[in-house]
Amino acid sequence: MILSAPDHTGEAGGSSPLIDRRLEEEIDTLRRRMTETFIREESFTSEPVMEISRMLDVKINEYMRQICVIR
């Protein structure tokens, strides 16, 4: 699932050209990695899952800062 900014009509769904597409892809990749790692580790609190979760938090915060700048 790729996060997307509201489009020019204010509706969510279309990525704004100002949002870095690579950042959206990184978030998507980290989500998949975290899910795969959780399945392998069978624990939400295992260190590998937590490490990916922290990286994902950083990327989501970066994404949200970009959204705030656009508005």
Image (tube, rainbow, N blue to C red):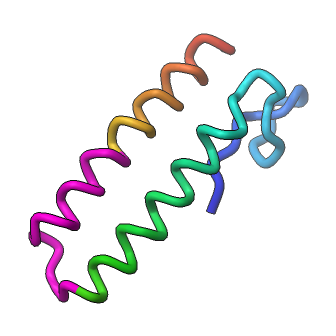
Q: In which quadrant will I find the N terminus?
A: bottom right
Find out whether residue 54 is within the magenta segment: yes
Q: Hey, which quadrant is residue 19 in on the image?
A: top right
Which span is picked out in magenta? 41-56
- Relative vertical location of residue 31 with respect to residue 27 in this rendering, above or below: below
At 46% across and 27% down in the image, what residue appears?
A: 62
Q: Hey, which quadrant is residue 45 in on the image?
A: bottom left
- Relative vertical location of residue 17 with respect to residue 60 in this rendering, above or below: above
Numbered-mark total: 0
Find out whether residue 51 is within the magenta segment: yes
Residue 17 located left or right of residue 25: right
| Residue farthest right in this picture | 9
At 33% across and 42% down in the image, what residue appears?
A: 57
- Relative vertical location of residue 12 with respect to residue 62 in this rendering, above or below: below
Residue 39, given in percent of the width and then of the height, sits at 30, 87
Name the magenta segment's main secondary structure: helix
Residue 71, given in percent of the width and then of the height, sits at 66, 14
- Relative vertical location of residue 23 with respect to residue 47 in this rendering, above or below: above
Looking at the image, which is closer to me, 11 or 51?
Answer: 51
At 59% across and 38% down in the image, what residue appears?
A: 23
Residue 33 located left or right of residue 21: left
Residue 50, given in percent of the width and then of the height, sits at 18, 59
Residue 37 located left or right of residue 36: left
Residue 9 located left or right of residue 35: right
Residue 58, given in percent of the width and then of the height, sits at 35, 35
Looking at the image, which is closer to me, 65 or 37?
Answer: 37
At 10% across and 64% down in the image, what residue appears?
A: 47
